[in-house]
Image (cartoon, grey):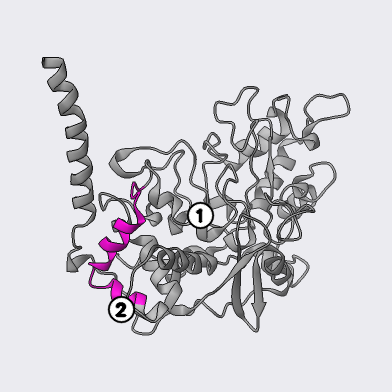
Amino acid sequence: MKNALYLFRWPLLCLLAVLAACELSNEKPSEMDAPVLPENVYNYSNVDIPPFMAGDFSNGGMVVDNGQLINLDFAPSGNSFELANITDAGATLGRVLFYDRQLSINNAVACGSCHRQEFAFADGKKGSEGFGSKVTPRNSMGIVNVAMNNNLFWDSRIASLRQMVTKPVQNHIEMGMESMEVLSEKLAKADYYPPLFEAAFGTPQVTEGRIALALTQFLSSMITANSKFDHGQENNFAAFSELEKMGQGLFFSERAQCSSCHSGPNFSAPDAPGGPYGGSDVRGTANIGLDLVYQDNGKGDGQFKIPSLRNIALTAPYMHDGRFNTLEEVVEHYNSGIQAHHNLDPKFIGPDGNPRRLGLNVMEKSALVAFLKTLTDEQLVQDVRFSDPFR
């Protein structure tokens, strides 16, 4: 009899817990939580993109038309796409949503909690803390010119930015808001959202699609192209130190082959024939020999997304599991630590069939690190347009 009562009470307790969580998620926000926004909205729609980078945006999903960014958000099903014109009002709404902790089930975690501006929108941790102190099994990636990528997350499982932006919100570890309908009802009760949605979309209605589109516009407007490296292209890198020039030479050399994976203006994975960008459906995954046996197999057989190296000096720790704390450790992995996994990317296999050893000396390794630091865009991490409006 006691066992029968226990079996009856357990699902009832679970139901009550779910109802309590839904009630919590529907609590009306207090007025003191309202964001502080400028009287005149910031400029997100007209962005000055260097000529050497504009072509890559066009190839990667962005068209630059007289300074106006038009995001081509490809659907994962193939060549179809949607135009998501970035507007100042739309990106402003996206900024508020990005930093609003009320997008989580317990009002404790925002997108910006795990993507912090001072870390180039990474978070400085091996695993990020979600709602209820749960920790993600993978490192939060920095947000770097996301409109130039069609593979998102470490396992490249999402091809569309608009599809991606709500996944962390609904994730059972990260933010826990599994029902977007519940979230829409919740946000509609906040006094500051109806005017923001009306400014962005013409009516105050809060919907899942509008939430996703506003976040997409905000993230797409985060363009980083103001590093020492970028400015160096204007004067043949006259401001580079000798160590930085040595590192640059190594990076693009046949010996190190760094640029074979991290290529183009975004220092990200090269395209390949066959997909909606004139390239592969999933751009840029590789097994880089982190382990002989992977506990996390990524996209499969130890393949993980090849990230952009822009702002890499700000986004430690490194790799999908945050195993390396410094750029020096990363360089040493490629210099001497690559494991002979059966699915190791061919570029890391030497003529004898074993993992390649670069044989870099101490100065050469320091030079590579010095060059990587020239990819830091200090303006991005200080730009008020991308800052937390709730502070």
Query: What residue lies at 48% left-to-right and 80% top-to-bottom?
Result: 43
Question: Which quadrant is the N terminus positioned in?
Answer: top left
Instruction: For mark 2, give the secondary structure.
Output: helix
Residue 143 at x, y = what percent?
A: 53, 56
- Dot 1 or dot 2: first in sequence order is 1
Q: Which label sits on residue 195?
A: 2
Q: CA distance from mark 1 to mark 2?
A: 25 Å
Residue 338 on image: x %, y %? 70, 29
The region drawn magenta spans: 175-197
Q: What secondary structure predominates along the stretch shown in magenta?
A: helix
Q: Is 85 situated above or below 341?
A: below
Q: Splitting the image into 4 quarters, where does residue 227 fall? A: bottom right
- Asked if residue 137 is positioned above or below residue 240 in the image, the reply reads above
Residue at the image point whose x is 43% and y is 50% from the top:
168
The residue labelled by disc 1 is 164
Q: Quadrant of residue 241?
A: bottom right
**Residue 167 placed where, x, y %?**
45, 51
**Is 179 covered by the magenta stretch?**
yes
